[in-house]
Image (tube, coloured by chain):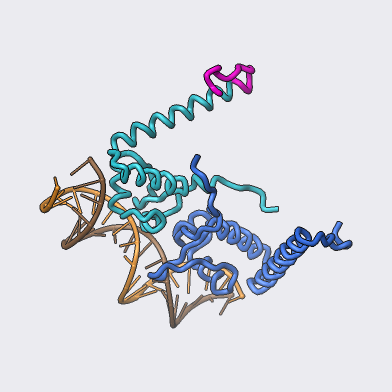
Chain colours: A cyan, B blue, C brown, D orange
DNA sequence: CGTGTAAGGAATTCTGACACG
DNA sequence: CGTGTAAGGAATTCTGACACG
């Protein structure tokens, strides 16, 4: 019936106050992680931050790392690396789909 | 890896201003539909309304009905009826799962 | 480095009401 | 009936800064 399961997880609709409640982090912390480029809220015309459920998960992961003593700079590096891997996999997947290029033999 | 796809669709995290943007309805309209018991936002301790993505869909459906000229009272009746059907189906499904009671012969 | 806080302003949300119809 | 609006107050969010360390 109601056709469409949009990208709920990616829709930026949560205010910082609500994010603070959900994640248990202070607004100060959340804004700081943005300053350190670990998270990227959408900005409304008026300038308020809006987050997605994906951002919730991302913040939780960041919080864990921080508790483990990892510095924001390191966390950022890890995330950039992970994003790169994802991009590489997507490209390989597309090539594979179109030309039948097999996966790397190093993959299990 | 990150295990859990919570009930994003049911989490009440969206403020009325954002709802207004998403649905295209005025805040006045959204509050009025609540007054007519068509929608049920969560209330924070401080009293602000919070909606879910399910509420977004619900509001869109309500808006359609209103445009067709259906009155809020009728919309409410339809929704109550639909909810009842869903409950009945769930009960029947559970009975069926436990005791193997067949579906009604009236079902296709 | 990561986070708390007070500061002042701007934007949000709330309710009850008057209006039109 | 459904919706717009002005009204006044309360709560939210924003930024830049000082503080501790």
Name which residue lies at 67% across and 53% down: A2
The picture places residue A32, in percent across and down from the top left corner, at 28, 46
Residue B51 to residue A2: above or below:
below
Instruction: Please give left or right for residue A71 compared with residue A1 in the image.
Output: left
Instruction: Please give left or right for residue A43 compared with residue B94 in the image.
Output: left
Residue D10 to residue B25: above or below:
below
Residue A72 to residue D14: above or below:
above
Q: Which quarter of the figure is the C terminus of chain B placed in? A: bottom right
Instruction: Please give left or right for residue B107 compared with residue A73 in the image.
Output: right
The foreground one among A45 and B38 is B38
The picture places residue A34, in percent across and down from the top left corner, at 32, 43
The foreground one among A90 and A42 is A90
The picture places residue B66, in percent across and down from the top left corner, at 63, 65
Name which residue lies at 49% across and 45% down: A10
Instruction: Tell me the chief SS of the magenta region.
Output: loop
Instruction: Please give left or right for residue B42 compared with residue C11 in the image.
Output: right
Span colored in magenta: A96-108
Is A97 in the magenta? yes
Is A69 in the magenta? no
The foreground one among C14 and A93 is A93
Name which residue lies at 36% across and 56% down: A24
Name which residue lies at 45% across and 68% down: B43
Residue reaching furthest to the front:
B99
The foreground one among A22 and B98 is B98
Residue A77 to residue A12: above or below:
above
């Amino acid at each position: 019936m109601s056709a469409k399961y949009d990208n709920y997880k990616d829709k930026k609709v949560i205010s910082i106050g609500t994010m603070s409640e959900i994640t248990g982090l202070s607004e100060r912390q959340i804004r700081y992680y943005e300053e350190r480029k670990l998270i990227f809220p959408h900005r409304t015309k008026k300038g308020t931050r809006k987050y997605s459920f994906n951002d919730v998960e991302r913040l939780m992961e960041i919080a864990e790392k921080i508790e483990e003593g990892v510095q924001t700079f390191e966390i950022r590096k890890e995330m950039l690396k992970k994003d790169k891997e994802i991009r590489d996999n997507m490209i390989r997947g597309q090539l594979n789909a179109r030309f039948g290029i097999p996966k790397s033999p190093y993959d299990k």
